[in-house]
Amino acid sequence: MFDPVTTAQVQPSSDHPLSPSGRFNRLSYIAWYGLLSLVCMGAFLGIFAFAGIFSLSNVDETFFSTFSGMTIFALIGLWLAAFYFQIVFLIRRLHDLNKTGWLCLLLLVPVLQFLFTLYVLLAPGTPRRNDYGDIRPSSAWEKILAWIMILFSLLMMFGMFVFAYYFASPDLWDAPTQIIQNTTEYF
């Protein structure tokens, strides 16, 4: 007789990271999300550089307007692909937490979005087999890329705080005339 509680789930022999079935631990999630960000940034720069080459050349105006429309479609397609893979990675991370993938809809709620993201990034996964399969260990490149992304994110946050502090403190600003008076012997 079939008993869903005691029947073991069979993990697919090839756990493909781009499919929503399976699990991602914290480092794998950060690494794949970082890889997606790097690929999208490179693709966006490539699209904009390619569009910029044609906008600066002496091409016909109808060709340029047609190419501008194709550029918009390429950007929309890239954005939709990135959005799809972000959802796939989030579903796999939720599976590691033994939660349903439908919880990714919490990203649509503005206040819960921040708290949910912190939960997904900081909560430890299930340390054993759960409803969504076996533990998926992080590979070496995932660990390295994840730690690089973590360090880069911390440096970016530090830079933003320094930038905000500098521009929020008008007493630190010197007018150009004050800079000239303080640094030259003429005055």
Image (cartoon, rainbow, N blue to C red):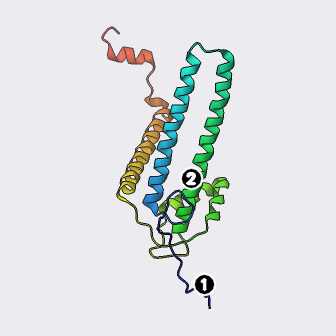
| Farthest residue, direction bottom | 1
Q: How many marks?
A: 2
- Give coordinates of residue 33: x percent, y percent: 49, 51
- Give coordinates of residue 60: x percent, y percent: 65, 15
- In screen coordinates, is 140 left or right of 124? left
Give the residue displayed 56% in from the left and 16% down from the top: 56
Give the residue displayed 58% in from the left and 69% down from the top: 99
Given the image, on which type of amino acid does mark 2 rest? Gln
Q: Secondary structure at mark 1?
A: loop
Q: Which mark is residue 4?
A: 1
Task: Give the quadrant of residue 20.
Answer: bottom right
- Give coordinates of residue 12: x percent, y percent: 50, 69
Q: Which mark is residue 86?
A: 2
Contact? badges 1 and 2 (CB < 8 Å): no
Q: Which mark is residue 75?
A: none
Is 24 in front, or is 4?
4
